[in-house]
Structure formats: C-alpha cells, structure tokens
Image (cartoon, rainbow, N blue to C red):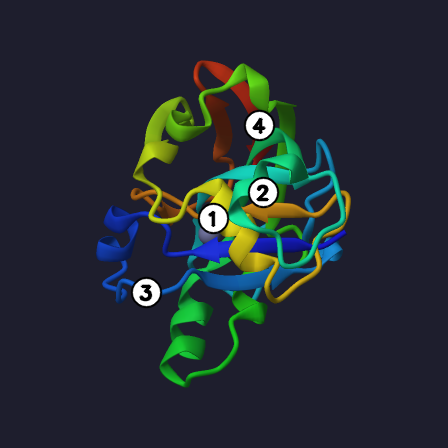
Amino acid sequence: MKIICIGRNYTKHIEELENERPDEPVIFMKPDSAVLLKNNPFIIPPFSEDIHYEVEILVKINRIGKFIDQKFAHKYYEEIGLGIDFTARDLQQKLKEKGLPWEKAKAFDGSAVIGKFCKKSELDLAAIPFQLLINGEVVQDGNTSHMLWKIDELISYVSQFFTLKIGDVIFTGTPAGVGRVEPDDVLVGRIANEDFFRVKVK
Ligand code: ZN
C-alpha cells in the first residue's frame, strides 16, 4: 500500500506556517515503512529537534482506479479514519528553503499513525468534527467543512497522477494548531467523541 498526503488543505493552517495558498492540492507520499505499528510508541528520531503532530482525516481506498471522475469518486472508498502525519519541521524548513523534496522530513519510519476506521455512512462527510488531544488537552480542533479540497475532489485529483489501489490511504491535510511533541506526551485522536487512536511519545 501507499500513503498519499495532502498538504495545505485548511486555510488557517496555511496561515500559521506562513505558506502560500496553493492553486492545486500539494501532494507528497509516505512509504509503507512509515506506518507506526499498532500499539507501538512514536519514538522521536535523532535527526530532528522539532517533531510536529498533524492530525488528519484518512480515506481508505477500496477499488483500483485512475483518472477518476469526481462524480464517481465516492465509489472508491467506504471507510474514514483518523491519523497523524508526523513532520520533522526543522528539517522540512531546511529542505523547503533549498527547494528540495520533503521526504526525509515527512516519510521517515513511524511518521504515519493510522488509527481505526469507521464506515463513511456513519458520518456526514461534509462536516466531520475531529480533534487531537495531548495529555488530555485539545490542541487541534478541525472540521472537514473547512477543507479547501473535499474528499471526492482529492481522489479525482490524485488519481490523475497515481493509480489508486485497494488499501491505499489518503491523508487529507491538517487543520490549524500543529505543534511540537515531547517525550511522554500521550496523543489521542477523536472523531466526534470517539477515540480513533492513542499514541505515546518516547
Ligand atoms: Zn499533513
């Protein structure tokens, strides 16, 4: 499986990182080795002093597809989940300044937390409320109604470049409130009031 991530999909997050608002979705990928194994802690890697959490709504692809028309995109997923796109922000900043690819800052081992999934029929996809709590305190409070590009638009766009396969996961971008993790932090992700993942930082 592959992980396709969308950057800059929420206006307030674009502003907090002082990024330009893109004309098209920003896309990057994580390899399957980036997936944090279930129940494992997230270990802060030695090459970064500034690992940021980014909570994101996930979409699991359940059919193979390419050049998917937006009006058929809903047929390509049944399940929605929640995860974290861990980012070595200091390293990413250096790479960005040099115009280099972001992979080292975004695709390292353990950088993709994939929590549980639920049936999309249980949610109002246009307005999914989701949160990240650190040590019990809400640090990110998002809603898919604030996405610049909605799920079906993202699937259509991404499939112009990459064939989507069964089991692929799309990370749909993070809302405002990103920040640094510290050893012993406990990160809990919620959709509505239900826990979708729990990760300890080491
Ligand atoms: Zn992200």
**Residue type at tag 2:** Ala
Please name the residue shown 48% across and 35% down the image.
Answer: 185
Neighbour class for label 3 at 10 Å: few (<14), some, many (≥20)? Answer: few
Q: Is residue 107 above or below residue 196?
A: below
State left or right for residue 100 relative to residue 146.
Answer: right
> Which of the 4 image quadrants contains residue 19?
bottom left
4 or 1: mark nearer the eye: 1
Residue at mark 1 to residue at mark 3: CA–CA distance: 15 Å
**Which residue is label 1 attached to?**
153
Comes first in the chain, label 4 or label 2: 2
4 or 2: mark nearer the eye: 2
Please name the residue shown 40% across and 22% down the image.
Answer: 136
Comes first in the chain, label 4 or label 1: 1
| Residue 198 disc label | 4
Comes first in the chain, label 4 or label 3: 3
Callouts 2 and 1 close, C-beta under 8 Å: yes
- Disc 4 Cβ-to-ligand 1 distance below 8 Å: no
- Disc 3 Cβ-to-ligand 1 distance below 8 Å: no
